Image (spheres, rainbow, N blue to C red):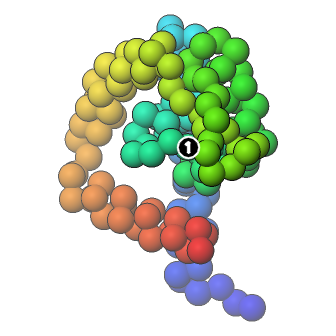
Amino acid sequence: MESTQNGEVFTSIVLEVFKLSGLLVVEGDRLTKETGLTSARWKVLGALFLADQPMTVAKIAKTMGQTRQGVQRIADDMANVGIVEYRDNPHHKRAKYVMLTEKGEKTYKKLVDIQVPWAEEKSSGIDLEKMRTTLQTLQLMVKKFDT
């Protein structure tokens, strides 16, 4: 099968997203260093903080586009240092809820204080409408894989 311009551009976007993802992990690890976290833990922390309902490991993994096993390992590590705790889930005997502790909430808020100026700096000079278009395009691409 011969590739179309759509397929070629799509592939180029995917490659740039892979590159950006790697750069964001490195940058996230740098930003979280003083809190003792990693960018992977920050992602779990953010998913929990922004959720409007209690979440299980499986729900966190689906929200983040990660494997359940990977999120389980991260959640267990975070529970060991008191950032999250497991609570009984009345809807499922084995799938416990992962809940932020007070320490977890404070840590997340500290990370927001670090992230906001960083985002302002990194977005400086990029046209707002182009960023909005990029966001919408990435959201459409995510839907293609999420269904």
Tell me what residue is drawn at x 65 percent, y 85 percent: 3
Q: Residues within 10 Å of mark 1 (few under 14, many from 20)?
A: some
Viewer-side residue, 19 vs 54: 54
- Compared across the picture, whether 133 is left or right of 73 comes to left
Note whether residue 83 is visible: yes
Name the residue located 64 percent from the left edge and 21 percent from the top edge. 78
Picture layout, residue 147 above or below residue 47: below
- For the C terminus, give its image quadrant: bottom right
Q: Is residue 114 left or right of residue 144?
A: left
Specify the farthest residue to the bottom. Answer: 1
Residue 48: x, y in percent? 49, 36
Q: Position of residue 13 (x, y in %)?
A: 53, 63
Q: Position of residue 63 (x, y in %)?
A: 55, 51
Q: What is the quadrant of residue 90 in the picture?
A: top right
Instruction: Answer whether residue 114 is visible to the viewer in this image.
Output: no
Quadrant location, the N terminus: bottom right
**Identity of the residue drawn at 40% across and 40% down:** 50
Quick check: 122 left or right of 38?
left
Say above or below: 26 vs 52.
Answer: above
User: Where does label 1 land, which residue?
Assistant: 55
**At 62% from the left edge and 42% from the top edge, which residue is drawn?**
89
Q: Residue furthest front?
A: 90
How many numbered discs sit on the rendered protein?
1
Quarter-wise, where is residue 80 in the image? Answer: top right
Of residues 116 and 64, the one drawn nearer to the viewer in this rendering: 64
**Kind of residue sitting beneath label 1:** Met
For label 1, the SS is strand
